[in-house]
Image (cartoon, rainbow, N blue to C red):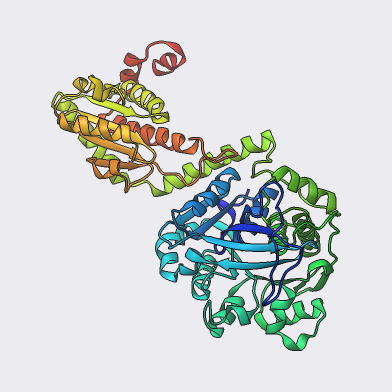
Amino acid sequence: MSASRLDVIGIGSVAVDRLHRVARIVGAEEKGILQPVGAGGPVEVHVGGVVLNHVGWASALGLRAGIFGKQADDPNGRFLRGAMDRHGIEHRFVLDGSASTFADIYVDEAGGRAIYMAPGATSETTPADIREHHAEFIRSAAWVTTEVSQLPLDTALEVLRIAREAGAKTVVDLDVPPSDAIPGLGDEATLLELLGAADVLKPSKSAAAELVPDAGTDVGAVAEAMLARFGSEAVAVTDGENGAAIATAEGVVLVPAAKPRAVVDTTGAGDAFLGGLLFARVRGLDWPAAGALANACGAACVEQLGAFPDDTALVIERVTHMHVGASPELGGAGTGSAVGTAAEEALGVLAEEMVALHSRLIPEHYAAAAALIIRAESEGARIHVTGIGKPEHVAHYGASLLASTGTAATFLHGTEVIHGSAGQVQPGDVVIAISNSGQTPELRLAVQAVRGRGAHVVAVTGNPKSWLAQNADHVLEAGVAREGGPLGLAPRASVAAEVGVLAALGAELEARRGFSRADYHARHPAGELGKKSNS
């Protein structure tokens, strides 16, 4: 496991792909008839987008992956974020875009395609957005990848600047020819600076040819010329069914294409190639082996309709079938994880999130909360702990822990507060309220009720800007970036963080009271702990 929290994250095209089947791709002034796509009529909706595709393939193969940027809170955006959640791809989106990205893709009987893109929010992302919302997320990854397709060039350049300052490896997918990128995405000088800032470049042969026109048509010569021009660590040039060439300081490696069993749809083959390349390099494969695995991913991609690896188990089977040569075991991070691997990943997430939580701890916040509790007790007031859902169970633990270490706390049932249990709370009491989101409606009602009774509130929450935080006397942050587990949805790390914060608050109170072993033994005379405290 790397020292960084995530293996790879990306920013760029994240799109809903609306697939259409046609007999052939028509030209100007021509008409065609849409054919059925499976059982879904003339259109079938898929997860897609250059960056989401290659991050998705890296995740399906076994990397800890994430994606970030701008979207809209619209049906397309919710569809895409739901897919990321299902596949364990961490996401950080600001939902203030005009519309989430979509593309209309027309696939002919030979698997060729024409693509029309509506970039929407991706093209609205600015360097200021990156600095304000995403810098810390960028610093969390070992590899950071982006594209020349829909993201403005100056925005992509800002991403690479932050990533390189943090010591991350950087990748740029030159997905469209420069003549298509300029002036739509920015100017020529910014494009050249962006390409020169990347550790790894992944252009298609046609896109690279515009930048090194004297290299001729040989893919190896094109890769070598690109390396010489931009000074990259490596340049991987894809050439469709002819394979790929990877140029490094050690020379040029020609990688033959893997042969698919059938060509269904060539959309996203280059994206799958890059996902495989990222996986291979993170797992330590040399460039020839990485290229072979990447080509196997490209071939596996064309065997399916759509570019995103939605069926993880099938992806692993296809890639394993086509990839010849030594490689690390595939799978582990996504929905195809083995049980043992999923358990290891979940515990790894818990450990990493606890380290991150500790790094953000503000001692003054704990000191202030502890001082409020001790002062309230000295004035005859009482301490209560409450929460809704999983935090209710945490509240039971918190009240028990505090009571055994010198703070006579009691559990307060969150939903019963507005049905009579508010009478448990008197003016001057302190209520410790636990909520990961800080927005839970039932807890809001409970806090309003105890506030109305004259109580103070200490919030334990993963969202320091939430309603709960804004309505508390003191806030103890318990935020996590990932929950862990195959879906990343069930409260795991967040519960551990809440328990940890209450344990830390209890330790602060214990120290301030001068709580002794004799004091502990008086509250816990039996069992093994009773024996230890009395020794």
**Identity of the residue drawn at 18% across and 31% down:** 455
**Quick check: 78 above or below 158?**
above
**Identity of the residue drawn at 16% across and 31% down:** 452
On screen, residue 312 versus residue 218, left or right, reads: left
Q: 112 or 232, which lies in front?
A: 112
On screen, residue 384 versus residue 360, left or right, reads: left
Q: Quadrant of residue 368?
A: top left
Q: Position of residue 187 (x, y in %)?
A: 53, 83
Q: Is residue 428 visible?
A: yes
On screen, residue 266 versus residue 504, left or right, reads: right
Q: Position of residue 2 (x, y in %)?
A: 61, 51
The quadrant the C terminus occupies is top left
Q: Position of residue 296 (x, y in %)?
A: 80, 57
Q: Quadrant of residue 200?
A: bottom right
**Identity of the residue drawn at 76% across and 89% down:** 214
Q: Position of residue 508 (x, y in %)?
A: 31, 35
**Quick check: 74 above or below 379?**
below
**Quick check: 485 above or below 305?**
above
Q: Is residue 139 visible?
A: no
Q: 266 or 399, which lies in front?
A: 266
